[in-house]
Image (cartoon, helix red, strand yellow):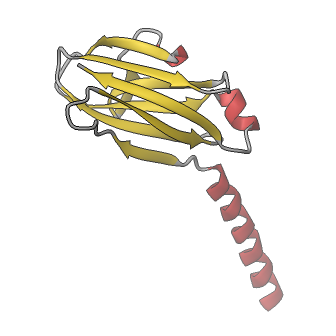
Amino acid sequence: MKVSIFKFLLIVAVALAGVASAVAQSKRINVKFAKGATSGTYSNAVMGYGSADFYVNAKGGQQMSAKLTSSNKSLYFLIIRDPANPEAIADDARDATNWSGELPEDGTYIVRVFLFRNEARRNKSPVRFSLRIGVK
């Protein structure tokens, strides 16, 4: 009986390890510009299905811009208004590496940097990037 319990626990442990590695890691970065500045540049990295989420507080009617720079051409960003409903607010934002537009309302916006699915599946090492965010 002890052998079968041991085997069962081993199978469960292996299964949980696989699930844990498949879960995407998301980083949260709160954006704060230097005093008097209207923009800033942030360096970070993503790996696999993970993302880096840059939280930006802004008012409706303000112009926001984001420019992503990376050597990996499968790295993109979305701009999201509501994390519960992650619909992009920008036209063609799913293919974006450079965007600017007027914000529809006051609140916190998320610039989510991520790898496309095909690259995320293959990717086993961190992909470094630089993201410039501006709000005027």
Side (left or right) of 2 relative to 72: right
The residue nearer to you, when weighing 67 against 19, is 67
Identify the residue shown where x is 47% and y is 47%: 27
Give x and y (percent) for residue 37.
Answer: 25, 29
> From this viewpoint, is residue 1 visible?
no
Image position of 12 with respect to 107: above or below: below
Q: Quadrant of residue 7?
A: bottom right
Image position of 135 with respect to 9: above or below: above
Side (left or right) of 78 relative to 108: right
Give x and y (percent) for residue 88.
Answer: 40, 20
Give x and y (percent) for residue 127.
Answer: 65, 38
Identify the residue shown where x is 62% and y is 58%: 20
Side (left or right) of 51 relative to 40: right
Side (left or right) of 47 relative to 101: right
> From this viewpoint, is residue 122 visible?
yes
Identify the residue shown where x is 48% and y is 15%: 98
Give the quarter of the figure containing the N terminus: bottom right
Q: Quadrant of residue 102?
A: top left
